[in-house]
Image (cartoon, rainbow, N blue to C red):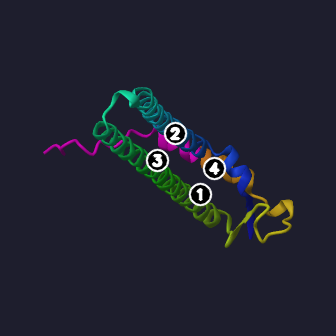
Amino acid sequence: MAFINSDSVLKHYEYFEVIRGKLETKGAKLEQDLRVRAQSLQKDIAAYQQNANNLTQGQARAVEEDLGKKQQNLQLYQQSLEQEMSNDQAKMNVELYAKVTDYLKKYGSEKGIQIVFKYDPGSDVLYGGEALNITDDVIKGLNESYKSELSQPKKDSTSVPKK
């Protein structure tokens, strides 16, 4: 039996830092895009409000309908971005879980460990003696494994096998 401090693993696992950074960068870009679209809509609304007195009732109604559609589209776009980010976060969590558990299976097999608990403030493990704490070893091993993955050449799925 052993345990890992999950907060420490997340803090020091280089792979997690990289994928979290990518997710944050993507989120910032999407947020900026949404902000630009919202500002554009606000400019259109302000222009309409300035020129409303110069429009006929029919023209005003048409512009209001168009602005309403644009606002609905912006809300739908925002919802789709939120869903996309949520899906990306879930995918990241699945990948992270798989990498950590795969490593722990190998580590456990090598060290004769049958079970590894996750230790954090929300876990059921209230205390674990330091002799059972394998956090540092796991972080070191995960980072070595990640560096090894990075140093291996990428497989090009678009290349045609040579005959």
The x, y position of residue 160, in whole percent, is: 18, 44
Q: Which residues are magenta?
A: 144-163
Res 125 → quadrant? bottom right
Q: Quadrant of residue 131?
A: bottom right
Q: Residues within 10 Å of mark 4 (few under 14, many from 20)?
A: some
Closer to the N terminus: mark 1 or mark 2? 2
Mark nearer the N terminus (4 vs 3): 3
Number of marks: 4
Report the side of 77 relative to 96 (left or right): left
| Location of mark 1 (residue) | 100
Which quarter of the image is occupied by the N terminus? bottom right
- Which element carries disc 1, helix, strand or loop? helix
Identify the residue shown where x is 76% and y is 65%.
122
If you read the primary sequence from the N terminus, does the residue marked by circle 4 or circle 2 appear first?
A: 2
Q: Nearer the viewer, mark 2 or mark 3?
A: 3
Q: Earlier in the sequence, mark 2 or mark 3?
A: 2
Q: Which residue is under mark 4?
A: 141
Marks 2 and 3 sit apart, C-alpha to C-alpha, by 20 Å
Structural distance between the alpha carbons of marks 4 and 3: 40 Å
Residue 119 versus residue 61 in the image, above or below:
below
The three-letter code of the residue at mark 1 reads: Val
Q: Earlier in the sequence, mark 1 or mark 4?
A: 1
Q: What residue is shown with label 3? A: 78
Q: Relative to 99, does residue 44 appear above or below in the rendering? A: above
Left or right, residue 135 beside residue 107: right
Q: Quadrant of the C terminus?
A: top left
Neighbourhood count class around disc 1 (C-alpha, 10 Å): few under 14, some 14–19, many 20 upward:
some
Q: Measuring from the top left, give residue 3's x and y in whole percent.
A: 74, 64
Q: Which of the two marks, 1 or 2, is nearer to us in this view? A: 2
Looking at the picture, which amino acid does disc 3 mark? Gln
Q: Element under label 2?
A: helix
Task: Tell me what residue is drawn at x 63 percent, y 63 percent.
Answer: 110
